[in-house]
Amino acid sequence: MTHPSLRPLLAVALVALPAVALSQAAPRSVWDGVYTAAQVQRGAAVYAAHCASCHGDALGGNDQAPALAGGGFLANWNGQTAAALFTRIKTTMPLDNPNSLGAAKVADVEAMILSKNGFPAGSADLPSDSGALGTIAITQDKPGA
Ligand code: HEC
């Protein structure tokens, strides 16, 4: 008999294990084509409506809001996962209305940001669940390059 108090732990382990196994079997990074061009177009519309007023039309930032493309931005996120950036956007942005965008819109705008930072498009959309996003590393330099 499973002790009732162990059940939440067990559930966490069962959810976490496949993600770990996947990331070990197939380590992926933003260099592997983790979003689609169509998604970037959707993300650009989200960005224009909810982000550009502070971060600038070209993601260059302004006096108050930081740039979302370029060396400074990439240095902040280098070594983190696409899930971390997703959570940062979803739970803290737009600064004046956090948590107002659904997961799909956040994934779309993240795809657009990745595209503006020079990472390549691929054949599948950037996912909008943190398990899958957690297997994608943000690496400033192309691995092996
Ligand atoms: C009202 C102004 C405002 C809006 C709108 C806004 N941001 Fe921000 N954003 C900021 C400010 C200011 C910071 C830095 C301070 C902070 O994080 O609270 C920031 C920080 C960030 C960061 C962290 C940057 C880094 O280098 O770590 C990301 C990512 C980001 N914003 C994405 C977005 C996205 C995507 C949107 C649209 C969905 C958005 N922001 C909308 C003002 C804004």
Image (cartoon, grey):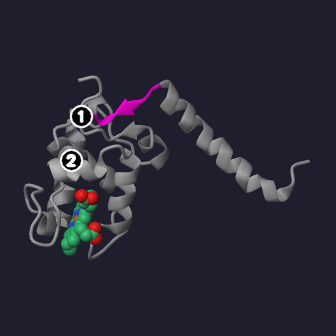
Contact? badges 1 and 2 (CB < 8 Å): no
Q: Residue at x 15, y 58 (%)?
A: 67
Disc 1 and disc 2: Cα gap in Å?
A: 19 Å
**Image quadrant occupied by the C terminus:** top left
Q: Amino acid at mark 2?
A: Met
Residue 46 image label:
none
Q: Quadrant for residue 18, please give it.
A: top right
Give the residue at mark 1: 141
x, y percent for residue 23:
49, 32
Count of numbered marks = 2
- The residue at the far right in this view is 1
Q: Is residue 7 left or right of residue 111?
A: right
SS state under label 2:
helix
Toward the viewer: 68 or 98? 68
Give the residue at mark 2: 112
Q: Residue at x 30, y 74 (%)?
A: 97
Toward the viewer: 49 or 11? 11
x, y percent for residue 108:
28, 49
Q: Is residue 101 above or below residue 95?
A: above
Residue behind label 1 places its C-beta within 8 angstroms of ligand 1: no
Q: Quadrant for residue 68, please give it.
A: bottom left
Q: Residue at x 14, y 60 (%)?
A: 48
- The residue at the far bottom in this view is 96
Q: Is residue 27 magenta?
A: yes
SS state under label 1:
loop
Magenta residues (range): 26-30
